[in-house]
């Protein structure tokens, strides 16, 4: 079959075809796909055959256990997911605008920004645009970048986990992030004046899942010290779960100082005198290359940069806990420092 011109090809694609390959790519089973889409299996088979005829290529290979996307099929499944996500966001924003709102904005942010910078920026945006619908995904950079690449987010405040990501995304650095090792005030190590990595290897940890940049830095530090990879651990990207596991389950963890400094100052947690060599890349604004930023995203970034500039003028840093930029704040150095009461 002769390849169709791009405009002719797009005019023949249908949302029901995209929905089918999206679900089939996830389930690998035509019967379950048909049931999920509330249609008969023959109808689902016909939709798939029509799409393969239009594209002139086989999208799925039948195996005894599942239907597996071909190399081109994987490309089509990825496109279908992005197109459906864009369509859903378009419909939601349209409904919001018809009600007199300001559309929608989907943000992704790492934990370091969740306790101060991000809430302040969102509060100011809502003050200016009270009817704007704002969706926030707070998790690790690797998950955020994946969601941004699929078109599920307008922008991300985070890091680029891999060098390959720099070819796909634009990055504007914002700030360094200081990490603290910490435990509950009742933890046996709470009174120690010095700790080495060797003292920490057998303890129960709660950490971000791999391959997040923070987790990769910690694993690399243990490996460089000749210690085995941490295996007594719980993995979660939830701040709430992390803090409560440290507080109630006797675990230790490492998080941005902006998240734990208040509880350390209040006596609920103690900062552990642990030094881990390594550098964490600065976090910043991540957007997709070649994609024009929406007006809502541009307005949010303007507010965000204004807040950062205000802090800089006051001698403050978004990553600091007492308002001053700390030397070496981009390193995973967690030596004990006096806590201001």
Image: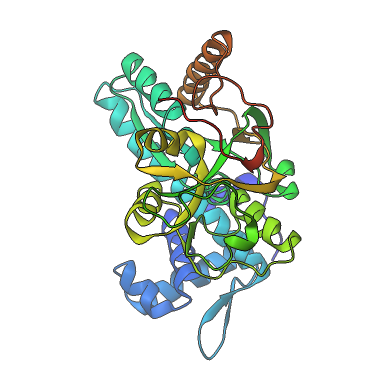
- Taking the spot 57% from the left edge, 57% from the top edge, the residue there is 78
Of 156 and 277, which appears nearest the observer?
A: 277
Residue 237 in the image, given as x and y percentages of width and height: 45, 52
Q: How is the image coloured?
A: rainbow
Residue 182 in the image, given as x and y percentages of width and height: 48, 47
Please identify the quarter of the rendering in which residue 158 is found. Answer: top right
Of 256 and 93, which appears nearest the observer?
A: 256
Please, which residue is most extreme toward the bottom here? 64
Of 18 and 67, which appears nearest the observer?
A: 67
Task: Using residue 263 as the reference point, say whether residue 229 is left or right of it.
Answer: right
Residue 266 in the image, given as x and y percentages of width and height: 35, 34
Residue 324 against residue 134 in the figure, above or below: above
Of 176 and 277, which appears nearest the observer?
A: 277
Residue 206 against residue 145 in the figure, above or below: below
Does residue 154 show up? no
Image label count: 0
Residue 238 against residue 300 in the figure, above or below: below
Image quarter hosting the C terminus: top left
Residue 231 in the image, given as x and y percentages of width and height: 55, 70
Image quarter hosting the N terminus: bottom right
Please, which residue is most extreme toward the left here? 99
Task: Using residue 292 as the reference point, say whether residue 167 is left or right of it.
Answer: right
Task: Using residue 107 as the reference point, say whether residue 326 is left or right of it.
Answer: right
Does residue 89 show up? yes
- Taking the spot 61% from the left edge, 65% from the top edge, the residue there is 74
Please identify the quarter of the rendering in which residue 40 is found. Answer: bottom left
């Amino acid at each position: 079959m002769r390849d169709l011109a791009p405009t002719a090809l797009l005019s023949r694609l249908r949302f029901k075809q995209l929905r089918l390959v999206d679900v089939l790519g996830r389930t690998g089973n035509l019967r379950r796909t048909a049931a999920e889409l509330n249609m008969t299996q023959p109808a689902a088979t016909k939709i798939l055959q029509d799409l393969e005829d239009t594209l002139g290529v086989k999208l799925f290979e039948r195996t005894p256990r599942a239907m597996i996307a071909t190399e081109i099929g994987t490309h089509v499944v990825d496109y279908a997911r992005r197109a459906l996500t864009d369509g859903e966001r378009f419909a939601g924003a349209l409904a919001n605008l018809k009600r007199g709102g300001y559309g929608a904005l989907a943000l992704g942010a790492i934990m370091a920004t969740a306790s101060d910078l991000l809430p302040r920026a969102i509060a100011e945006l809502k003050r200016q645009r009270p009817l704007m619908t704002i969706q926030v995904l707070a998790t690790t950079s690797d998950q955020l970048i994946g969601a941004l690449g699929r078109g599920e987010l307008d922008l991300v405040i985070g890091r680029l986990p891999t060098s390959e990501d720099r070819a796909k995304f634009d990055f504007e650095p914002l700030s360094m992030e200081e990490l603290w090792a910490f435990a509950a005030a009742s933890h046996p190590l709470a009174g120690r004046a010095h700790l080495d990595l060797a003292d920490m290897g057998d303890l129960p940890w709660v950490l971000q899942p791999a391959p997040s940049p923070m987790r990769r830095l910690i694993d690399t530090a243990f490996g460089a010290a000749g210690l085995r990879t941490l295996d007594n651990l719980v993995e979660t990207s939830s701040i709430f779960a992390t803090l409560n596991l440290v507080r109630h389950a006797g675990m230790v963890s490492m998080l941005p100082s902006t998240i734990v400094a208040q509880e350390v100052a209040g006596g609920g947690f103690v900062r552990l005198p642990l030094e881990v060599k390594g550098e964490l890349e600065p976090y910043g604004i991540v957007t997709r290359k070649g994609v024009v930023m929406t007006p809502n995203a541009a307005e949010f970034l303007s507010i965000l940069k204004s807040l950062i500039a205000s802090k800089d003028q006051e001698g403050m840093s978004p990553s600091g806990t007492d308002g001053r930029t700390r030397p070496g704040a981009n390193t995973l150095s967690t030596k004990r420092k006096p806590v201001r009461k």
